[in-house]
Image: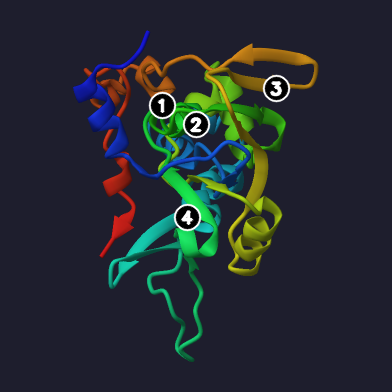
Amino acid sequence: MKLGQKAMEALRREVAGRLRAGDDLVAAGCIALQGTALLVKYERETLRRIFSEGFLYDAEKNPERYGVRLKKENGDVFLLPAEKKEIRDEQGEGSGILLSEETGCSGYCVSGRGGVLCALWKLAEASGVGLKADLRKIPVRQETIEICERFDLDPYRLLSGETVLAGTADGSGFVEACRRAGIPAAVIGKAVTGNDRLLYSGEIVRFLDRPGQDEITKLPWGAEWKTDGIFPGQESKEICQD
């Protein structure tokens, strides 16, 4: 079902730029770190029966270690490791990645409620393109995988406020720039012509559906992350700081 005009306008406010068919899709920052940390916070007593305190400590700290943030400076937007507060270090050297047409980034979207699959859908829908993405290439921590398994949650649909999806003509170059900056990143697929949005996992292929509620809302304490709209929204403001 096609989005109405107001819904499309709202969606495009969450996406910077537009994907072009042929763009590489890059995921910067590990997914579902925010949701995993919340699970540890609210379900610690359950989890400590299964996992060590060190394991749970790492899961709580992972958003700072393996996530990203956006920072604005003079109208430009830079991608930084979550632990970095400034675009330049004490020596004046740049530690951020400029997200702009000039640097080859045609469009990007901050993941948030609904997880990385929600962000993929937003990016493709707002750009009017299809996509092909390999779930196995998306950066995800082992702590997230194991904790999600305990609660039968899908990490690809779990709160991911420390992940940015970007489209670029040079995915490998973008990933290398991320790694030099200390950001985990990977090329996870491509934007394609048409409307088909396909997800691959080994020999399994399925369509990317319109987003539903975040997986965290399945928990008794997860109600505050529910949304009333047709897609979870407005996360792009949460990690972009002036």
Q: Quadrant of the N terminus?
A: top left
Do the numbered discs 4 and 3 sit on residues whose CB atoms are within 8 Å?
no
> For the point 21% across and 17% down, which residue is it?
228
Q: Nearer the viewer, mark 3 or mark 1?
A: 3
Q: Which residue is mark 4?
A: 68
Image coordinates of residue 209 in percent, x first then y, are: 49, 14
Q: Which residue is mark 3?
A: 200
* Other-residue count near label 1 (Cα within 10 Å), few / some / many at <14 / 14–19 / ≥20: many
Residue 1 versus residue 61 in the image, above or below:
above
* Mark toward the start of the polypeptide (4 vs 3): 4
* Structural distance between the alpha carbons of marks 3 and 2: 13 Å
Q: Residue type at mark 4?
A: Val
Residue 114, numbered circle: 1
* Other-residue count near label 3 (Cα within 10 Å), few / some / many at <14 / 14–19 / ≥20: some
Residue 234 versus residue 76 in the image, above or below:
above
Q: Residue type at mark 3?
A: Tyr
* Structural distance between the alpha carbons of marks 3 and 1: 19 Å
> For the point 27% across and 39% down, which residue is it?
13
* Structural distance between the alpha carbons of marks 4 and 2: 17 Å
Say which element carries label 3: strand
* Mark toward the start of the polypeptide (1 vs 2): 1
* Other-residue count near label 4 (Cα within 10 Å), few / some / many at <14 / 14–19 / ≥20: many
Q: Which residue is mark 2?
A: 120
Nearer-the-camera pick, 159 or 49: 159
* Structural distance between the alpha carbons of marks 1 and 4: 17 Å
* Mark toward the start of the polypeptide (4 vs 2): 4
